Amino acid sequence: MGRPGRHLIAGGFMTWLFAVTFFLVLMKSVDLMVFLVLVSIGFFLLIEVLDTTFVSPSHVLYLKYLVAAGLVISGAAIIDKLARVLI
Amino acid sequence: MKRKTVIKGLVVAFSIVCLLVLSGMIASPELYSEEQTVSTMAHARPVPDERPADRRMEMVVPAMADLMDQTGTIVLHVREKDFEKAEEDLARYIEASRSFNNLVISLDMSESDIREFAEGNMENMDALATLIEKSKRMDELSRLEVVYQDGEDSENLYSISYEGEALQMKMEEALTRYQDRQTTMTEIGTKYDLPVSSYIHSVSGFAGVVNETDRTRQAWNVGHDDDQPASGILVSPHSASYGDIVQVSGMIPMTSAGTVSLYLDGKEWTSATTDHAGRYAAAIPASSLSAGRHLIYAVHDGVYSDVTEFEVLAAPAALTLEAEPIVSRGEENVLCRGTLLCEGKAVEGAQITITSDDGISLMAETDRDGAYSCTGRLAAGPRQLRATVSEDLLPLQPTASESVGVEVPEPSTWVTVLAMKTAAVLLVGIGVALAVRHRRARRRSRHLIVVPRRAEIPPGEEWTGIAPDAASPPVEWTPSAVEEQYAALLSSGRYGDAVRLLYLAIAARIGHALKIRNYTTLTPREVLGIAGATTTPSAPSALSKFILSYERVRYGRPAPSYEQTKCLRQLYDHASDQGGDEH
């Protein structure tokens, strides 16, 4: 099986995605922005787990940029939601 | 391998099944339905909103009954010539009508009966307002007539007689409108079981008031007689519409040049100059008059002309409306504009009312080009707007524009737009940073040593290999050469290469001393281990400090800094002093 840790991480991420989808549907609030925010959080955690201490492979580096873009979009979505509630 | 494939297949199949199960619920998830009778202790079944649609009628019908009931009181007060009470009742009636209209809009009553009742009620309101206003003025004229009769003031008698005729005409028009609505309103009232008797009495009372004032006015005409011959007045055309000019002309006999006052509907409207023969002419733009019949006569030095009549027809108009949302921090969130044309001609000064389906109305006035625009604040969400022009002062038919949809933004939209713009800037920044990083990495890769490809081995021949010294000429690691390269690398900011140089210098000395040719293939710890086995105990201590620090700096996450490089240089010097040079 090679490195079982990789499969655990992939399985954990899939479980996270299914859980997010399931609860969004259960709450009758299938919102793409909320989904994006939650997926970004999961992705961020995934990158943190994958990251190594002494070496920084290029693919991890580029994934960090992807996570940064996702967090920016998530932040904008959160500000939008807060503004709708507060204003 | 087979097990791995089976697991992958199971995961894919499970995912597809989950997506298929959830796909039906994503569009319209139905967690509760009428057929679902199963309930658990963890939740209560929500009570469905079983409020019947007729409940709204229970709220509207009393308001309709109240409106129909109030009309009789108003007419009764007018008939009794108690105009003060009539005006108070009318004010209450107008307020009740406004509340009723808002109620109909807020309850989203789209039934044709209710809408027709609301329209008829508004027309009745106008007719009753006209009745009170004209009756009050007619009452004043009646009293003046007695005064002038006693004073034998024939000039003013003419004046009030003509004004009374104009008032009578307006009242008859209002009565016609009021009577035309009677059938419809009575039918609607009967359908909803409303008390219509008061309303029916109001119609007959209205007619009674009009007949009474007509008799009074005719008595004025019979009462006065004059020796002066009446002068003629001509109007052409007798029927005009918006944009037409009504020409008024006539002749005052036995007069020289002077000024003639023209009275329209009992009020002085303009003046005209007579020539030597006493002829005068004036033009009245029909666009400035309301639709309906109008009376006009001329007065010169107390000499009254005949009264003549002309009619201004209400012309059809074309009203357009455009609406667009406004994103701002201000109160306004929608911009409306459009044009009002009547038979191709721009209509100026018309009051436009823009009504939204949330019950809010905006007002605007057309300019010289017939264009209007206004801003306002509507409830957020998809809104349907309609512009209407119901102009009493202009001869236009009641006209409405097409219904226009507009997505009114939320009050927080400006925050959202700001956040999105900031996010866009940040994303662009991230993209630029990524591009710069990628470009730097590519440029750095150009400095890497290119390993020559291994020579092709002819089939059947043996690989003899390449002597290390022949492949790469030996580097002279003299202290001066190391110092020179180190200074060059340090000045160019290549700290990583500088510390690598220090390590290679030490490793080269150890390799040279111990006759290890391939020292570059060894790891720093292997070099440290080999050196520690052959040197004094103190020397490896300094060397191990250098090697361990070198590993941290060289392979650590952040790039080597200037301070770290200088620190390593000190350790390098220390290691060289204590034993590195012995090798």
Image (tube, coloured by chain):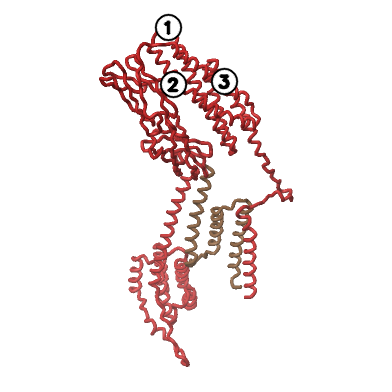
Q: Secondary structure at mark 1?
A: helix
User: Dot 1 corresponds to which residue?
Assistant: B150
Residue at (50% x, 22% y) in the render: B131
- Give residue B293's quadrant in the image: top left
Give the Cα distance between marks 2 and 1. Answer: 24 Å
- Give residue B146's quadrant in the image: top left
Farthest residue, direction left: B276
Q: Which chain has been coloured red in this picture?
A: B
Q: Residues within 10 Å of mark 2 (few under 14, many from 20)?
A: many
In this rendering, the answer to whether B281 lies above or below B431 is: above
**Residue B73 in view in this figure:** yes
User: Dot 2 corresponds to which residue?
Assistant: B166
Q: Which chain has been coloured brown in this picture?
A: A
Q: Residues within 10 Å of mark 1 (few under 14, many from 20)?
A: few
User: Dot 3 corresponds to which residue?
Assistant: B205
Q: Position of residue B220 (x, y in %)?
A: 45, 13
